[in-house]
Image (tube, grey):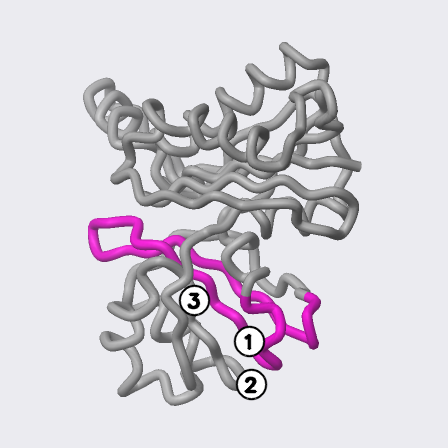
Amino acid sequence: MKILGIESSTQTASVALSEDKRILGEISLYTGLTHSESLMGLIDGILLKTGTPLAAIQGIAVSVGPGSFTGVRIAMATAMGLSRAGNIPMTGISTLEGIAHVSADFRGIIVPIQDARRDQVYTAVFKGEGGRLTRLEEDQTLSVEELKTLVAGQASPVLLCGPDAHGFYERIKTEATQLVAFINQQPRGAALCEISLEREFSFEIRPNYVRRSQAERAYFKEFGVHVLND
């Protein structure tokens, strides 16, 4: 099965193509969130590089967040456009799971993070077991203090990974003694391809924003609407 992986939830866009368990090619590019101008070019590039026509793609694995709201929407819109054009089923994958997947060989607790701004992070908790991941906690938004408590409460060594790992590692390492290492890891299209091998495909995907966008929060505030967990 040939799968196209699409990732643009951070400032680095990444696309990959796989056939069964083999990665045929991957292209990643730092675009500074201008994904609307570059993502289709990257997809055209990976198809050309691997000599693969769109008609040969049998599935699309797309990152659905959390991350940049604009980036997530661009990735999903691109995936849905290709899906409709080629009648190709899709599967949506958590950006945080994709980040953790790259470090799955670490034996211990894997905590992927992304900067959610306002002194908060998007995070989740996984257990690494020789290349396989077991999810322990769902995707969530935490303050830096809550992240420190989360890491300090783990019973096994903790790896912090993600595009913003170094900065947060430095902020919490003194008190979170279980924290043993960090990896500055950008999300990768290849990880989506690999994860998708164990997922079901359909023609519907939903975003995983974890919290509402700034525009949505402003709207609800203006009209006096209180939203739980926002």
Q: Is residue 229 visible?
A: no
Cα separation between marks 2 and 3: 16 Å
Among the 4 quarters of the image, the one containing residue 105: bottom right
Which amino acid type is shown beneath numbered disc 2? Ser
Whichever of callouts 2 and 3 sits on the residue coming sooner in the sequence is 2
Outermost residue on the top side: it is: 85
Q: In the image, which residues are magenta?
A: 103-132
Check the picture and name the quadrant holding the C terminus.
top left
Residue linked to disc 3: 161
Whichever of callouts 1 and 2 sits on the residue coming sooner in the sequence is 1
Cα separation between marks 1 and 3: 11 Å
Among the 4 quarters of the image, the one containing residue 91: top right
Q: Position of residue 122 (x, y in %)?
A: 39, 53
Q: Position of residue 203 (x, y in %)?
A: 70, 20
Residue linked to disc 2: 156
Residue linked to disc 1: 109
Magenta stretch mostly in which secondary structure? Answer: strand
Which amino acid type is shown beneath numbered disc 1? Ile
Which amino acid type is shown beneath numbered disc 3? Cys
Whichever of callouts 1 and 3 sits on the residue coming sooner in the sequence is 1
